[in-house]
Image (cartoon, grey):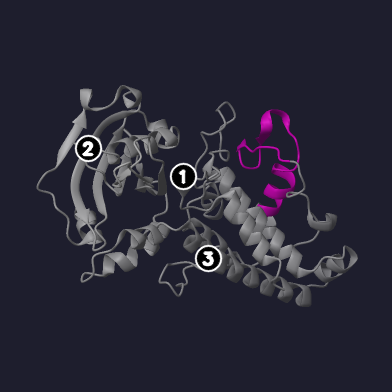
Amino acid sequence: VHFSRNLLNHIDDSSNFTYQGSYIPDAYKPYIQTLERIGKYQDTEDNKIDLLIVQLKKETLLERARTRQRNFIAWYLNGSRGGELKDAALVAFVSPDSEDWRFSLVKMDYTLEETPGGKTKVKTELTPARRWSFLVGENESSHTAQSQLVDILADDKNDPTLPTLENAFNIEVATREFFGRYRELFLKVKEELDKLVVSDKTISLEFDDKSIDTINFSKKLLGQVVFLYFLQKKGWFGVGRDEDWGTGTKDFLRRLFEKKIVPYGNFFNDVLEPLFYEALAVERTEDFYSRFNCKIPFLNGGLFDPINNYDWVHTDILLPNGLFSNNEKTKEGDTGTGILDIFDLYNFTVKEDEPLEKEVAVDPEMLGKVFENLLEVK
């Protein structure tokens, strides 16, 4: 409620209520426990926006049944309460026993038609709703949500309009920011590799012999690490020998860097290269990787083949550990300018967006755009 007041400045909480039991339509009862309205808001363009908390019945439903969640809010907005139409809702979707929750903007796209008498009315069939969401909580980064909502939160004088809220949930804004930071990381990696090629004859000879340039090596390294973030999100790293895929830790790479899994001298040379070119690239019995004392999935397809088949075992590429994590301040004020520091700021999702459902997170589609834009960087 406090967050809602800061976001919208002026909300009306004089007529709040809770839907539960028979007030929930039968089609949604398997998924929805309660719907609570904690306030309503009308912007300067007369858009009516309700503030809702929806308690789901099962923790897994936060990720699954997203269409049903969206349609439930569409039912609510489309005249469920005395026939009054609402334009949008800001909704907190909460699961029992889950430390994470989904903060969504759900907006109706009403279709108008003219009656025989010349009046305009909304078509009576179910109007599609669009949903944009941030996944936030104990296990998720709140950086993107904070950075995209900060301008609204900081503005105490002007009440945000619905288009302003839509822009705050815009995936394109997140894409531009992520690409800018990704590009900076690429240039840092290339700079460090250039130094090593000049100072280390073994690396220089190996790169010459295998026709490797620092541009493509840097692009591949970042692509490998960012791909690991998707696998990490799925819980595929740190899985015990007899445990199921999906039960692994969601901060495996950070734990690797902090030497909680295996000691090392140089993070890239001693940890990442074996992870890339041995653990992920070689098929093993039961997928168990003894060096890390856990299961690591076997992935073929080329991403985890050494670029131009360079001799990673006998070539010590000692990229500084600080390239991956450090305590430097970013220009935005975050702590850490390393690869892991920056990637840790973002939510990663393996779900492809649907036309009516947008997750404001790094997804394969966004990453494809980043790679495409990076092709032009030399």
Assess whether mark 1 and mark 2 are in contact (beta carbons under 8 angstroms).
no
Mark 3: secondary structure? helix
Single out the residue that lies furthest toward the left: 14
Name the residue beneath numbered marker 1: 357
Residue type pointed to by label 1: Glu
Residue type pointed to by label 3: Arg
What quarter of the picture does the C terminus occupy?
Answer: bottom right
278 is higher (above) or lower (below) than 153: above
Single out the residue that lies furthest toward the right: 209
Seen in the image, is 363 located left or right of residue 304?
left
Q: Disc 1 vs disc 3: which is toward the camera?
A: 1
Name the residue beneath numbered marker 3: 176
> Is residue 159 among what the camera can see?
yes
Q: Disc 3 vs disc 2: which is toward the camera?
A: 2
User: Residue 323: percent from the left, percent from the top?
Assistant: 59, 67
What crowding class fits label 1: few (fewer than 14 Cα within 10 Å), some (14-19), or many (20 or more)?
some
Name the residue beneath numbered marker 2: 83
Q: Earlier in the sequence, mark 2 or mark 1?
A: 2
Q: Earlier in the sequence, mark 1 or mark 3?
A: 3
**In which quarter of the view is residue 59 placed?**
top left
Q: Which residues are magenta?
A: 272-299
Pick the front one: 259 or 249: 249
User: Residue 109: percent from the left, percent from the top?
Assistant: 39, 47
Q: Which mark is residue 123?
A: none
Mark 1: secondary structure? strand
Mark 2: secondary structure? loop
Please say whether residue 296 is one of the residues in the magenta stretch.
Answer: yes
1 is higher (above) or lower (below) than 327: above
Q: Earlier in the sequence, mark 3 or mark 2?
A: 2
Seen in the image, is 214 located left or right of residue 91?
right
Please say whether residue 222 is one of the residues in the magenta stretch.
Answer: no
